[in-house]
């Protein structure tokens, strides 16, 4: 299989960061661990299909340093993935876009709810807002999430806690903010807490998220 | 123990509390935020003997800041401003001795942010910083009439410096140096500043063919993104960490402060440079800042200027 491995491309993003473009999420996870181990002084952020490696100050050697790590051992296919943390998020599936989503995916609203709850999601990257995780499906999917586009025009205000899907991904809006994804429900979990110095965000890159219907208050 | 009142704000224009920001939380989606004009902020902090990047400053983007001291302390103003203490005109870029009861007015007048630091000011931090993230709403505060700054005044701080020559070797704000991504033909055209904000500076230019449906990617302060509407956006300290627009280049670190000096209506051009040149420009800027900090030490007995 070695012949199939291609060293990922590394391009400058300004004078103190590079983007490493990867083929797929598995490669991204493996390379992140390799780079973090070899270059501990650098800040590494994940994208969907890239890693952003950032130095505090301009660094002409940054690109070659990163390339050297990537070339040293290609991609370690056998690196055991550390056990991902699993985050459970109870959802009230009553989002305003649920019927539209069901139409677009050609199924019933119950099918959407069931498929979203059964799907394992992984935090691919954080961004857009503090605590906002872009969740990608991992493993088998019963619905083709990728066939659902973003809304044609974004809403100026999406309520805090909204659970949304679009463009093959899912997310929870940690605060009220503009948003262009389809709203299928809401969670009561506080996704970002500025007063929690140790762990302000519920989600971290690499975490696995399991959604499920919230218990109705009895 | 809550510190006593150091001064009371009588009037404030567009003013927020800032420090060095939250550079290490990008992995959780938290923007760096912090002082928009880093070198002015660091100068202002050093002049009152504060640990730069950790100490609070008022960042004044427009209008006046008027305050009344409740304790004797030292105060510094850095940036284009008219400074008066009890009616007497005093210089910027120097630590000023102020007494309890004195009125200080700072009138913004020029390009870019003005920083006001007060020796002894203690400001609570959120996630390690007192910076006001104007976009996500995290931390800090907007400064307004009736607000107070708390702390124990320290009038022993006196420092001054002549603005270092190296700080003026950067090109004027109308030319910004970039590391271009891909082809650099967008650099050659002229852009007009349409709007400025800590989250991003919008530039108007000719409409171009750019893709509108790119997947979101991680991005960085200083990135120049092209929108389908023909705008370019230079991401600022409160800007998002992911972007769905095409990034056509990133400003060099040495020119980031210049973005905060851009006024609406001015024309700018981008000049592509390589990473080696960007790095040299940064080193030159750093050695200028180093000299300044040395001269702003605690000088104790020296009388207050004026």
Image (cartoon, rainbow, N blue to C red):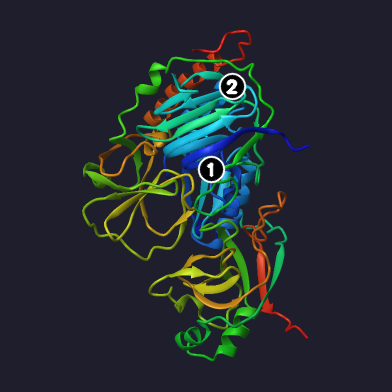
Q: Residue at x 55, y 40 (%)?
A: B17
Tags 2 and 1 both on a single chain: yes
Pick the front one: A87 or A163: A163
Q: Which residue shows up at 53% across the image and 27% down it?
A: B103
Q: Position of residue A118 (x, y in %)?
A: 65, 80
Which residue appears at 46% of the width and 46% of the height? B220
Q: Which mark is residue B102?
A: none
Residue B59 in view in this figure: yes
Residue B293 lies, in percent from the top left, at 54, 19
Question: Alpha carbon of mark 2 to alpha carbon of mark 1: how far?
Answer: 21 Å
Mark in front: 2 vs 1: 1
Specify the quadrant of the image occupied by residue B151: top right
Q: Position of residue B104 (x, y in %)?
A: 51, 28
x, y (%) of residue B288?
46, 19
Q: Which residue is mark 1?
A: B145
Question: Is A209 in front, or is B40?
Answer: B40
Image mark 2: chain: B
Helix, strand or loop at disc 1?
A: loop
Q: Quadrant of residue A87?
A: bottom right
Sort mark 2 into few (<14), some (14-19) or many (20+) by Cα contacts within 10 Å: many
Q: Residue furthest bottom?
A: A108
Q: Which mark is residue B74?
A: 2
């Amino acid at each position: 299989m070695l012949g199939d491995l291609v060293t990922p491309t590394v391009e400058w993003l300004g004078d103190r960061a590079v983007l490493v473009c990867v083929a797929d999420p598995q490669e991204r996870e493996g390379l992140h661990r390799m780079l973090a181990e070899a270059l501990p002084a650098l800040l590494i952020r994940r994208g969907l299909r890239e890693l952003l490696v950032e130095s505090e100050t301009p660094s002409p050697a940054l690109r070659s340093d990163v390339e050297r790590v990537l070339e040293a051992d290609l991609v370690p296919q056998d690196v055991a993935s550390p056990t991902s943390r699993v985050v459970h998020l109870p959802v009230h599936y009553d989002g305003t876009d649920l019927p539209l989503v069901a139409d677009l995916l050609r199924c019933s609203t119950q099918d959407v709810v069931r498929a979203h709850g059964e799907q394992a999601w992984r935090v691919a990257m954080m961004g857009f807002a503090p605590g906002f995780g872009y969740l990608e499906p991992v493993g088998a999917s019963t619905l083709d999430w990728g066939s659902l586009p973003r809304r044609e025009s974004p809403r100026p205000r999406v309520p805090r806690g909204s659970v949304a899907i679009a463009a093959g991904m899912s997310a929870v809006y940690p605060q009220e903010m503009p948003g262009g994804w389809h709203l299928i429900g809401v969670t009561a979990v506080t996704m970002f807490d500025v007063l929690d110095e140790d762990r302000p965000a519920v989600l971290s890159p690499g975490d696995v998220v399991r959604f499920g219907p919230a218990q109705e208050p009895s | 123990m809550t510190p006593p009142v150091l001064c009371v704000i009588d009037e404030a224009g567009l003013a927020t509390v800032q420090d060095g920001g939250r550079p290490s939380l990008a992995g959780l989606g938290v923007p760096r935020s912090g002082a928009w004009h880093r070198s002015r902020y660091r100068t202002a902090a050093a002049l009152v003997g504060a640990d730069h990047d950790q100490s609070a400053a008022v960042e004044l983007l427009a209008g006046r800041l008027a305050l009344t001291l409740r304790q004797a302390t030292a105060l510094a103003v850095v940036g284009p401003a008219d400074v008066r203490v009890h009616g007497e005109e005093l210089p910027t870029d120097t630590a000023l001795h102020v007494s309890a009861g004195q009125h200080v007015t700072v009138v913004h007048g020029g390009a870019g942010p003005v920083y006001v630091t007060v020796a002894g000011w203690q400001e609570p931090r959120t996630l390690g910083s007192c910076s006001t993230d104007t976009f996500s709403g995290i931390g800090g505060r907007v400064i307004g009439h009736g607000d107070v700054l708390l702390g124990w005044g320290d009038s022993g701080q006196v420092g001054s410096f002549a603005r270092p020559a190296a700080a003026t070797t950067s090109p004027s704000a109308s030319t910004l140096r970039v590391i271009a991504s891909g082809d650099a033909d967008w650099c050659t055209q002229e852009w007009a500043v349409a709007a400025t904000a800590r989250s991003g500076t919008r530039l108007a230019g000719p409409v171009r063919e750019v893709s509108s449906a790119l997947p979101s990617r991680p991005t960085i302060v200083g990135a120049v993104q092209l929108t389908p509407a023909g705008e370019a956006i230079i991401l600022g300290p409160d800007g998002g960490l992911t972007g769905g627009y095409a990034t056509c280049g990133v400003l060099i670190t040495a020119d980031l402060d210049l973005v905060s000096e851009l006024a609406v209506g001015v024309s700018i051009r981008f000049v592509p440079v390589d990473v080696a040149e960007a790095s040299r420009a940064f080193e030159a800027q750093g050695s200028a800042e180093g000299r300044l900090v040395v001269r702003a030490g605690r000088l104790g007995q020296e009388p207050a200027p004026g």
